[in-house]
Amino acid sequence: MRKLLTMVIVPLLTISMIGCSGTSEASVDNAKLMKFIETQVVKNKDVKVLGVEIIEQKKVDELPGWEVIFVNMKLQYNNQMINAPETFFVRDNVITPLVFDLDKNVNYRDEIKPTIKEALYNKEHLVAGNSDAKHKILVFSDPQCPFCQEVVPDLLKAARENPTILSVYYYHLPLEQIHPVSVTIVKIMEFAQKSGKMDMIEKLYSLQIDPATTDEAIILEEVKKQLGISVTSAQINTKEILSTLQNDKDTASKTMVTGTPTVYIDGKIDKLREGYKDLLTKK
């Protein structure tokens, strides 16, 4: 995505201020925001900006006087529709994609994330642990992502062994451009979830296959050969499964998730993806 965009460091934009009961809140004019994105953010002339959706706008304790705006840019590139999440920081008449604290060496763009909605913790995405567990973990993952293969199976195992302490809510985010094979694998995983065969999810992380493979028949045969899991193309291509996977993709976009594995513990981003281990030592 960064190949499509060029970011400026401190662009300016006129922001209208709306006062209410002695307080003021930055209100970004959508038309001005669109113009700003078209002229200052998207520099590739082959990319067309179709629209921009403000996902969330909030004040944060870390940056007094600033507001953070999370947006989803609707782009068209090579006749392909692309959702591109972006973060902007607004203060008075200034808007910028980057706020960096030189003293603390902190990039707030990496630190501040959208609010995780309670609705994301639902039974359809619960793959390990109890729904009333003390700690809720949200995971966006790709089964062919090497780092995911290191992190996610251990996390699932920990939740299964400590169901009252950890619960894992799993969202599929296959990185199709990097691991095309994952598009089929996540269909199998979702079939397993809907069939109540949660152990299959962990097994599929051990599948050894060329990540560039796209032939579904070859992938299904390898899954059967290596893991003893037998499923058909018809079983994994139902409208329900395809709809669920699209919803997972949309959820990732609205949550500003672009990489895997992305892990949230109790609504807070866990950049090291190992925070759950500390929770187990405190049990």
Image (tube, grey):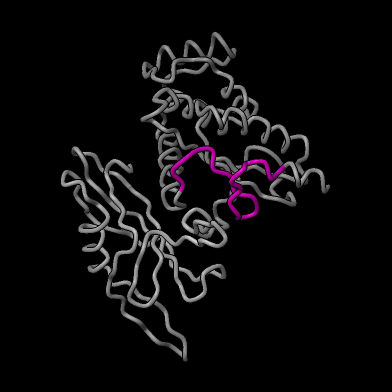
Tell me how many marks there are: 0
Residue 70 placement (x, y as % from top left):
41, 60
Query: As displayed, is residue 172 above or below residue 85?
Result: above
Residue 36 placement (x, y as % from top left):
24, 63
In the picture, the quarter occupied by the N terminus is top left
Residue drawn 50% across the image and 29% down it: 145
In depth, the one of 260 and 55 nearer the eye is: 260
In depth, the one of 36 and 71 nearer the eye is: 36
Q: Main secondary structure of the magenta part?
A: loop
Q: Is residue 58 magenta?
A: no
Query: As displayed, is residue 89 above or below residue 113?
Result: below
Residue drawn 65% across the image and 54% down it: 266
Asked if residue 110 lies left or right of residue 54, the reply is right
Residue 74 placement (x, y as % from top left):
28, 51
Magenta-colored span: 257-276
Residue drawn 40% across the image and 87% down it: 19
Asked if residue 228 lies left or right of residue 17, the reply is right
Q: Residue furthest bottom?
A: 22
In depth, the one of 195 and 75 nearer the eye is: 75
